Amino acid sequence: MQKAKDGHVDFLVLGSGIAGIRAAIELARHGCVLVLTKGEIFESSTEHAQGGIAVALAEDDEVHLHFDDTLRAGDGLCREEAVRILVEEGPQAIHELIEWGMHFDKNGGKLAFTREGAHSRSRVLHSQGDSTGAGILRALVAKAKKLRRIEIRPHSYAVDLLADSGRIAGVFYLDETTQSLKEIRAGSVLLATGGLGQVYKETTNPPVACGDGVAMAYRAGAYLSDMEFIQFHPTALYIQSAPRFLLSEALRGEGGLLRNIELERFMPRYHEAGELAPRDIVSRALVMEMLRCRSEFNYLDLTGLDAERVMKRFPKIYSTCLAFNIDITLDLIPVRPAAHYAMGGVATDLEGATTLEGLYAAGEAAATGVHGANRLASNSLLEGLVYGARAARAMVEKHGFSDPLPSQASFASAKHIPNHAPAPRTVIAAAELERAACHIRTILWEKVGIIREGNELSEAIQKLDAIELSSPKTPAQPFYQTRNILEVARVIARSAGERKESRGAHYRSDFPLKDELEPARHSYLSRTKPVSFA
Ligand code: FAD
Ligand code: SIN
């Protein structure tokens, strides 16, 4: 790729998860694509996705049922056009993936579908049982590697966007192998940097999910949307001082039950769908049971299921738990909720254009409105495929942002973005940064978590505002990451403070009901504009 070597490419993609690689494949038809990604190519949430990918392809399923289920889970906040695109373009996106070499699990020669929470049909495709994301990513990367015009450059940590003549024109990035700051220019830039679970003390997300792309876009002046909506997955493995390994919702789809520490099956008391109620409802029920029973966890019980089937269907979960001395076919599994998914992100229109010219976003970093206030299980891998491809097409067409924003909002201008890399000042010890990150994560977990309240949110905002990070003398990733975590944490807390209602994953004990206003409103904010709703 001659052009990348010259410091310029046609298209720059940040992130090598499902959204970034799918977009790169589309872009390669029209020019040279450079994918910058932090760490190893496969280190992403996509790689860890277990349950599967939702798509209306089963014989008893219909696109309109997938549409209805998505809207219902989104609790009145989904953007209907965005959902329609997702469910209608989804089947074709899956066929394409299969053509590129993806193998989904089958039953008697036919695609096998599993059930997850809030789905009215079994419509979740999976691969090697519980390694769906890893399978999809391998198929996409293999396809991308066959295309001469794509270069994937690992260990390249994007630090900040750079602007030229009022549009986003490239990025400053840290070469992780040499620790040197570099810049690359491009015709347009796609943010596909994934989620932000690492802003919370307890998360299912891998270490790369620090909200970098959202923070970069925010600093550059882009609008963010719906940042208060964080999905907490009900069942993360709870073992003190071990990472919160995800226990797929598909385990409940296959018949797993939730019990409190008194061994009572409690979900039917909370929702008619029991263990398969929408995720926000299950997570809050788990918290209520922990409070009631004064326990730190609940149990997931798979002991009533056929042991052979559990081992075959969930080999990764089985072996991971066994490494912690838990045989999931015999033992109750200690679980509690953990931060899992960001419904909000960088505001985009239906084509992935952000409010900054030249900047596009797709996947978990973007807020298209497709998930509303609570994402339907297994819809995000599909979103990465469908909206990754759409954003790529918009980059080729130079499509600009085309949505209305709140009336007091004006389009941000990229011309104010500093056109230089952040200036290093004082030395800052790694341990000090780690302490700061830990402090931020604890504030978010304790005060901007599953159940929120106005005074606690104000306290969180104050505490976060009081944190100052001095920048290091030499470029250092831990500093950049902690800075991003702090910025994203502040935005989540402020957005949560302003939404004075309970909706989907945003639950306020001081405003336990949904706002009467119809239609429901999305929140927006930018570096220079406070939170507003439209
Ligand atoms: P990611 O896959 O996270 O990729 C982001 C990429 O950006 C990574 O390569 C990362 O290294 C890179 N990056 C980040 N910051 C920078 C930076 N500063 N510079 C350069 N590169 C950067 N969804 C489903 O639909 N079904 C499931 O079964 C499912 N299971 C899940 C299980 C787990 C444990 C987790 C954490 C999530 C799961 N999800 C699932 C959610 C889903 O996996 C993600 O929402 C989706 O994969 C996001 O894709 P993405 O391409 O947007 O981001
Ligand atoms: C899971 O397997 O439970 C995760 C599915 C998702 O996050 O969509």
Image: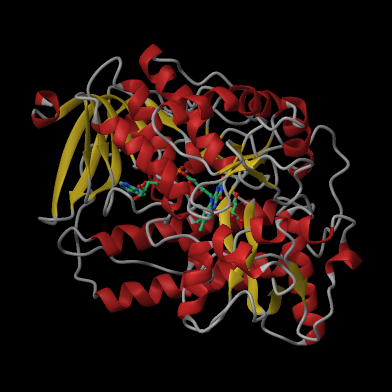
Nearer the observer, 438 or 362: 362
| Residue 191 appears anywhere in the view | no
The colour style of the image is secondary structure
The part of the image, by quadrant, that contains residue 261 is: bottom right
Nearer the observer, 188 or 285: 285
- Is 333 above or below relative to 196? below
The part of the image, by quadrant, that contains residue 139 is: top left
The part of the image, by quadrant, that contains residue 451 is: bottom right
- Is 455 above or below relative to 54? below
Residue 215: where, in percent of width, then height?
42, 48
- Is 194 above or below relative to 334? above
Q: Which of the image's four quarters has the N terminus?
A: top left
| Residue 171 appears anywhere in the view | yes
Residue at image point 77% right, 76% down: 259
Q: Is residue 470 left or right of residue 445?
A: left
Q: Residue furthest front?
A: 108
Residue 200: where, in percent of width, then height?
52, 66
Residue at image point 79% right, 41% down: 120
Residue 184: where, in percent of width, then height?
18, 34
Residue 6: where, in percent of width, then height?
8, 28
Residue at image point 71% right, 57% down: 254
Nearer the observer, 202 or 408: 202
Q: Is residue 252 left or right of residue 468?
A: right
